[in-house]
Image (spheres, rainbow, N blue to C red):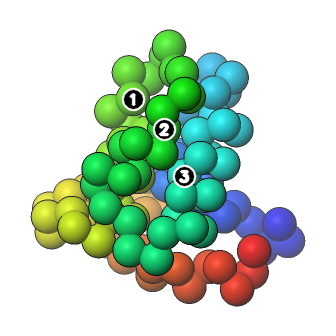
Amino acid sequence: SKKGLHPVQEKIASFHGSQCGFCTPGIVMALYTHLRKTPSPTLHGLEEAFDGNLCRCTGYRPILDAAKTFATDAAPCEKKLESSSKKEEGKAVERHSFWEDG
């Protein structure tokens, strides 16, 4: 978009959830769609949203770490997972405020 990356894309990138890039579009769309349909996403629901998306590079951990930042039932330490990106350090995710922009 004209405003930059969508928050889902930012999280995937900042948590190093993309390596070769082959699976990234499907994972981003699965996470985006789940968040769009689910007003209060849970850890379990977010994990289930990735069923059918295969990633052979990352081992899923960075992808799930990025997704956890959107979960309503995540422990405080999971919501504040720090990435190595300076841009993301200390920045809280404002839940669902990005839906207005599409």
In the displayed structure, 68 sits above or below 53; it is: below
Q: Residue at x 70, y 86 (%)?
A: 100
- The answer to whether mark 1 and mark 2 are in CB contact below 8 A is yes
Tag in front: 1 or 3: 3
Residue 82 at x, y percent in the picture:
28, 55
> Disc 2 marks which residue?
50
Tag in front: 1 or 2: 2
Q: Residues within 10 Å of mark 1 (few under 14, many from 20)?
A: some
> Disc 3 marks which residue?
31
Quadrant of res 61: top left
Residue 57 in view in this figure? yes
In the displayed structure, 52 sits above or below 49; it is: above
> Disc 1 marks which residue?
60
Q: Residue at x 48, y 69 (%)?
A: 38
Q: Residues within 10 Å of mark 2 (few under 14, many from 20)?
A: many
Residue 25 at x, y percent in the picture:
70, 38
Residue type of the residue flagged with mark 2: Phe
Q: Which is more toward the observer, 21 or 34?
A: 34
Disc on the earlier residue, 1 or 3? 3
Q: Residues within 10 Å of mark 3 (few under 14, many from 20)?
A: many
Disc on the earlier residue, 3 or 2? 3
